[in-house]
Amino acid sequence: MKTWNFGIIGAGLIADFHAKAIESIPNARLVGICGTNKNKVQNLTGKYHCRAFSHHSEMLQSDEIDIVTVATPSGAHLDPVLEAARMGKHVICEKPLEITLDRIDRMIEAHKKAGTLLGGIFNFRYNDSLKHLKTAFDNGRFGTITFAAVYTPWWRGDNYYKDSWHGTWKLDGGGALINQSIHMIDLLQHLMGQVESLQAYIATLGHDIEVEDTATAVLRFRNQALGTIYGTTASFPGQPRRIEITGTKGTVVQVDNTFTVWEFADQTDADRKILEESRQAEAGGGSSDPGAIPFQPHAKNISAFIDAVEAGRDFEINGPEARKAVEIVLAIYTSARESRMVVF
């Protein structure tokens, strides 16, 4: 079995999750880490017994590196991702891929031209409970879907926004939507398909920052179902994320990773087992502390990317797929700023 050698670009909080994830994958090896903060790089390389690279260019020139993960601030993804394509390295990049669609499209095109894989990290997709929800969708068990909603009522204290990039348009690309709620927005579009139109409001109500800490949108999907998105970092002390789906033959409500409602017109013993097993699921975390999440979904996300590289096939969360959630977020910002409906 081939061992895939990884480098991590970025040395902040999420880089630690990438390192833990890579360390746990049998056919993956962490070679090194680079970042702009030398102390953080030294702390991580000491913790994981790997090499400190001075810059991402040095890392990408190394013949030892097969795949890089990008864990820099969101608005600083473009340059290392483009350079990785030029150097023939596969890339799996933290959410969001970037903060504008133009930048994302440049990243996608660069890796398409290079013949390398570009994938996104949406680790919520790799929670075990999601496969049951997706199967129910694919099997038509909801009947005609009438409504779908996601809620991310999270809390971030003022200290969270005192670093150099969180809560800025330049590097965060926005606030509660593009950083925190984008996970749930990705799940919504993954399940429901394309959005047809939306109308939205954003506000900054609980923090002294230049971007939104509260947002809401009303949507119509291409399948004609209606929906809502709500996201905030101003809901003390932070509540679990939630997704609700309902239709003419079934309803599911999931709170973090637990199904609180799982009811269908054609209910079976398997449904009762799914409901019971989900009650034993690990809590989602992250509602008030960005570090309080399990690393295992990241590991599954990265492992699935390795599988795609090995098989020579496209990754399930490839560039175009990871782009979709960003497109919805940016449409919400446009609708809110211009006080108009956005049609896709």
Image (spheres, grey):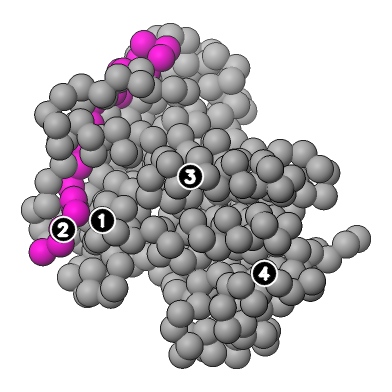
Q: Quadrant of residue 215?
A: top left
Query: In the drawing, does residue 297 fall left or right of residue 235?
Result: right
What's the amino acid at mark 1? Trp
**Quadrant where the N terminus is found in the figure:** bottom right
User: Residue at horizontal 29%, vertical 46%?
Assistant: 177
* Residue 242, x across and y down, in percent: 35, 41
Indicate the secondary structure of the residue bearing disc 1: loop
Q: CA distance from mark 3 to mark 2?
A: 23 Å
Query: Local crowd at mark 3 within 10 Å, few (<14), some, or many (≥20)?
Result: many
Q: Is residue 153 visible?
A: no
Q: Is residue 170 visible?
A: yes
Q: CA distance from mark 1 to mark 4?
A: 28 Å
Mark 2 or mark 4, which is nearer to you?
A: 4
Q: Earlier in the sequence, mark 3 or mark 2?
A: 3
Residue indicated by mark 1:
169
On screen, residue 113 above or below 331: below
Q: CA distance from mark 2 to mark 1?
A: 7 Å
Residue indicated by mark 2:
210
Q: Magenta region: which residues?
A: 208-227
